[in-house]
Image: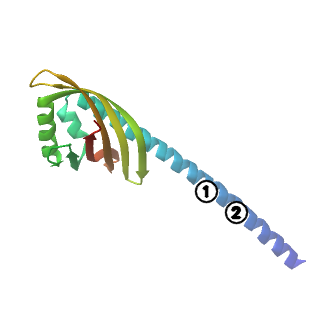
Amino acid sequence: MKNLVIILMTTTLFAFSQNTSKNTNSTNIKNTETMEKLAKQEIENLLMAYMETLNTSNAEKATSLYTKDGAFMPSGAPTAIGTENIKRAYDFVFSQIQLNLEFYIEEITIENTMAYAVTSSKGSTLIHANGETIPEENRELFVFEKENDTWKIARYMFNKTK
């Protein structure tokens, strides 16, 4: 009888622990999904803020969206690394052109404190030197890092599609 009680207690405890484990795993999965959704939303907001800086020629704001050691890799121009160089690069770009773009987010992938996004953009470019407005289409690759609990652009590269 004593052995039967021990077996029943052991079986009950085992079943209880399995159920608790399933609940914990389910909660952890839901928390992870929620955190990923929040991170994706933060990155989408960052991309929209970046688009706005391009459309308003705001070099200061564009630079603030990068990590301290970020890299801006424009098509046909040298890579600008670090806050001061990125600011100079955007100052130069915006002195030459005025962009009017829409961003289209194709993919955002997150791994811990790093993420990347593939985007495309379409719109127009006003060339200050001659006043001509031309079509603009690009595809972009962004790499993001968490800096002080905030998503920032760590690397940005684009090239023209046409």
Compared across the picture, whether 84 is left or right of 73 comes to left
The quadrant in which residue 54 appears is: top left
Compared across the picture, whether 21 is left or right of 160 comes to right
> Taking 6 as reference, is 94 above or below it?
above
Camera-side residue of 61 and 132: 132
> Taking 121 as reference, is 83 above or below it?
below
Q: Secondary structure at mark 2?
A: helix
Three-letter amino acid code at disc 1?
Asn
Q: Residues within 10 Å of mark 2 (few under 14, many from 20)?
A: few
Residue that badge 1 annotates: 25
Q: Secondary structure at mark 1?
A: helix
Kindly identify the residue that appears in the image at 11 percent across and 35 percent down.
92
Camera-side residue of 58 and 141: 141
Q: Residues within 10 Å of mark 1 (few under 14, many from 20)?
A: few
Kindly identify the residue that appears in the image at 59 percent across and 51 percent down.
27
Residue that badge 2 annotates: 18
Kindly identify the residue that appears in the image at 25 percent across and 31 percent down.
53
Q: Residue furthest left?
A: 129
Where is residue 36 drawn, in percent x and y? 47, 46
Where is residue 55 drawn, in percent x and y? 25, 27
Q: Earlier in the sequence, mark 1 or mark 2?
A: 2
Report the label total.
2
